[in-house]
Image (cartoon, coloured by chain):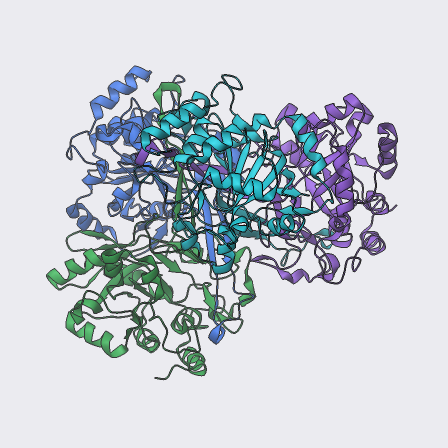
Chain colours: A cyan, B purple, C blue, D green
Amino acid sequence: MTTSISDMRELGRRLSNWGRWGAGDERGTTNLITPERVAAAAALIRTGTIFELGIPLDGDGPQPGGNRINPIRLMAENGQEQVLPGGFKWADDYVFMPLQAGSQYDSLSHVHYDDQLYNGHPGTGVTVKGADKCGIHTQAKGIAGRGVLLDVARTRGVEWLEAGTAITPDELDAVVAAQDVEVGPGDIVLIRTGWRAKFLADHDPAGFMAGEPGLSLSCATWLRERDVAVVGSDNWAVEVMPGENPGALFELHMVLIRDMGMTLAELLDFEELSAACAADGLYDFFYAGPPLQFTRGVGSPINPLAIR
Amino acid sequence: MTTSISDMRELGRRLSNWGRWGAGDERGTTNLITPERVAAAAALIRTGTIFELGIPLDGDGPQPGGNRINPIRLMAENGQEQVLPGGFKWADDYVFMPLQAGSQYDSLSHVHYDDQLYNGHPGTGVTVKGADKCGIHTQAKGIAGRGVLLDVARTRGVEWLEAGTAITPDELDAVVAAQDVEVGPGDIVLIRTGWRAKFLADHDPAGFMAGEPGLSLSCATWLRERDVAVVGSDNWAVEVMPGENPGALFELHMVLIRDMGMTLAELLDFEELSAACAADGLYDFFYAGPPLQFTRGVGSPINPLAIR
Amino acid sequence: MTTSISDMRELGRRLSNWGRWGAGDERGTTNLITPERVAAAAALIRTGTIFELGIPLDGDGPQPGGNRINPIRLMAENGQEQVLPGGFKWADDYVFMPLQAGSQYDSLSHVHYDDQLYNGHPGTGVTVKGADKCGIHTQAKGIAGRGVLLDVARTRGVEWLEAGTAITPDELDAVVAAQDVEVGPGDIVLIRTGWRAKFLADHDPAGFMAGEPGLSLSCATWLRERDVAVVGSDNWAVEVMPGENPGALFELHMVLIRDMGMTLAELLDFEELSAACAADGLYDFFYAGPPLQFTRGVGSPINPLAIR
Amino acid sequence: MTTSISDMRELGRRLSNWGRWGAGDERGTTNLITPERVAAAAALIRTGTIFELGIPLDGDGPQPGGNRINPIRLMAENGQEQVLPGGFKWADDYVFMPLQAGSQYDSLSHVHYDDQLYNGHPGTGVTVKGADKCGIHTQAKGIAGRGVLLDVARTRGVEWLEAGTAITPDELDAVVAAQDVEVGPGDIVLIRTGWRAKFLADHDPAGFMAGEPGLSLSCATWLRERDVAVVGSDNWAVEVMPGENPGALFELHMVLIRDMGMTLAELLDFEELSAACAADGLYDFFYAGPPLQFTRGVGSPINPLAIR
């Protein structure tokens, strides 16, 4: 598949979910997470072991500054000087952070092109006040169900893929086959590139953000054909960086979010989960990853749980 | 039970969980959420219907200013003036907020007395940098399992209890009996006082924070005897305010958090969940409420899911 | 003078300074503060006594929440736990605040109407990134020169004027006469309504912001005829609130800032200065009030000095 | 002069100003800026030309992240979607920033050693709430008077001194002689190392912060002998970095701030001022640099004016 600018738009039209869940829909593919599928996913809780997929939110995160920074959490009270009735002492803290500083969802208002968001909502509705449509709060109750880890790095037998390595649909098929797992409608599909493992090994934020391995644009079709609900990754943009098309930026974002209405999860940590899945060969689990309800927000920090 | 200052300390000693999960433990009663209990709770996902228990995070929240404020979310990018390769447009936002501005967990470092946190960790460990021990990040993977709603307001047949109304152990027993539900070890128990319904009715932040109905100090024993893991409420402090003892502040907080090591969940919204539970008479469900992993944080915003 | 909407626009056209300092000018009436006038103003430093006109920046300020909040300053370091070479201990703090939380300048990009800022700069240039034109940084070196206090409250013999009291040009003339002071080109004119004295007396932020005494719309002409450079006040909007025209908002702001290009200074404290001026009957002084250089900012906190 | 740790303490004792302005004094050497000296300095306003010494506050500043960040200014309103009576449109912005992100004063509570601040105030008074004593607000009205630029880089005939270059008392004397200017009691002395010129040339924040040319520890005596009130510089720490004593950190800070009670001004821009002073050979001027009144703050952003 070629990836010129015109192709991206053509691809977007072909894979579009606009109108599929109604003219006013703001949730996109998370509509695929039906109660029936959630109920079925409960059976994937086998031993009750919980894995958290969020990364720590502190000054040692992957944001080297620039558009985003690492969270800055500061104490308002620590109790040390308080003299209160009954000896009560309390502590409190504040945070200043980009909503996409660490593990996070991209809402459907996060990216757009040609003046339209997902489902034709006007791009001008994203103002200084936030997203008039497709804010992250519209996903408040949606993101729990069947999760599937596609462990690309492990299947390749490497600690991590190098920056700029594009994962193709064929490779996703190969991982599915190697893991003996199915991907189907309403699934939350998590792609392990090992990029988080690299960060844990070298703690180099600038290197982490300078590029990354990730999905090729052609994976949009693969995800659409399977009616995946959410795609997540252990890198910062799901898609390969630098992108395949030197004349464009974040083409997979544009097709997935704006045309298909798919919520992305980024900057996740699958390291412990990966080891557990490899140990018993079971790569699906119950996923519970609620966003915070930031009204009109274009993203939200998350700490999803994978429960096996 | 009397509630003088000395009684609070005596009660704390009697109900203490210090040492129960090891000398260095920082997690307290969430240790009671064992894999077995999580796995058993999966059976409570019957139809797969999801209820979000968080409140919206925006300027219309319940914080009238003072120690805390409502979250302030501001846009860093909205795409309108961007001219980027391929027509890519993106939006991004920042937030400044108290970690306890809305629906949130109190970490075990949130309150203490007599120079010691839960399990004897030194109170001086809560510094300008945050909590050296018992930070909210220590709960990163713990808080999912069996949830039980105790709908006090509905059982009383009122929209909400008035501020200053203390809920006693006897009333909890009566609610349990009326709802025909059991409360047992490792449960996440959610107390509905209707205080959120009041806020939704009158949108009066100052009134909301001026007092509240809630648990009496004597409920600590009730929770301890059942080995409840987490207690949550739709008010802002779980316990009745003003407190029962005019010579003290937040005595239930001190006993639950510092002596028993119990994580509290506050400012939740049970309105939709309450209606659904009342409709079919089933008051237990699968609860998934991960905190964000704020390293050394003394609290975390949350949006827990109740899945029935 | 009537103050209907059409009159405001007519008044704006009549008093307009557009084009006066060049087609691209972004500074407006601070152009009137010429080096000659600054040099002449130096002679007003008689005894070298300094008065600060800013109000404290802390949680006890006049912002009750809503569009703006009081500054929230939090410590990042306090030195207590540091163990550094040579025994060095350091403290550091962060602030989160509206740039117009306390004593502040309104930049010429702060308000506009009919799609144009001062001097015809497009209103659309104020984006999510800030002000493309007329940002506060364009005033970086301008605001020092001759200051004149017009003590309306003292001339009336009251502690403060009541909210809703409009100060007319006639009253300004009367104050000028009573004080035996002149107002001329390039002056920084400070209007004392006593509203700050009221706040210091009752510490009621909500009452402080609910209305205020201030200039009538007709004072725009008075200021323009004298070629005043900057007008400041001890209230929060310079102009009377509620405004004289129930069908409009902040008409004086619109004429002064957008049509005349005048920088406003708000939320100042003239209490000590007022006493000193009254004591010796000298109401002019050297004023030095640099804004912070927030690039593209629409306002800046200030702490101007009056030196007598 | 040797600079071992014991020497620093010995030097501090020798140069100490503790008690000089009373046992409770919190202002230190700004007490030297008497009204008489302010009045005399007014004569230095010759032509009325104003130079601003602050650097722009935006994302392109010298803070590469870590302990401090560049200011993050975000818009709360930009007017574009507002529909208000009379056509009024307004814009507003918020900032999150370290109080020492750019041009700034170090308050006397910024550094200390051996458990005591300036004048013996207890170091433990710097808590999570800020500085109990010696907060920046105590300087609210003090910092205006005679300014003197010591242009070390120009006297050396270089664009800037290299990082690690220590400026000695002898070099200060040589600059004073070359410039034919005097330094005396109550002066605000500004040291130009050219480090700002380097930043403007290479825009390399990491390089800017990695080290700097600056005053040697021995300059403390030089400043004390002349009873200088404030010392400022175009680097980020006034003193040479790395410091002369490998076993210690910021020794000059400790002696100047803690022992002598001297307010420091950092991250200033003297480029235009330097050119003007060189052009007419006049290196003194009126300096007006009010801090913002952050109650209990340990620093404040500033934009001082030099008026010639």
A42 and B87: which is toward the camera: A42
The N terminus of chain B: image quadrant: top right
Give x and y (percent) for residue D197. 23, 60
Give x and y (percent) for residue A234. 51, 46
Q: Is residue C290 left or right of residue A273?
A: left
Q: Is residue C64 above or below residue B185?
A: above
| Quarter occupied by residue B242 | top right
C156 and C64: which is toward the camera: C64
Q: Is residue A59 above or below residue D149?
A: above
The C terminus of chain B: image quadrant: top right
Give x and y (percent) for residue C171. 32, 29
What residue occupies the far bottom of the structure in this picture? D2
Q: Give the residue at x 30% y 48%.
A: C290
Q: Is residue B189 left or right of residue B136?
A: right
D64 and A104: which is toward the camera: A104
Q: Is residue C180 left or right of residue A161?
A: left
Residue C48 in sight from this viewpoint: yes
A137 and A276: which is toward the camera: A276
Give x and y (percent) for residue B168. 84, 38
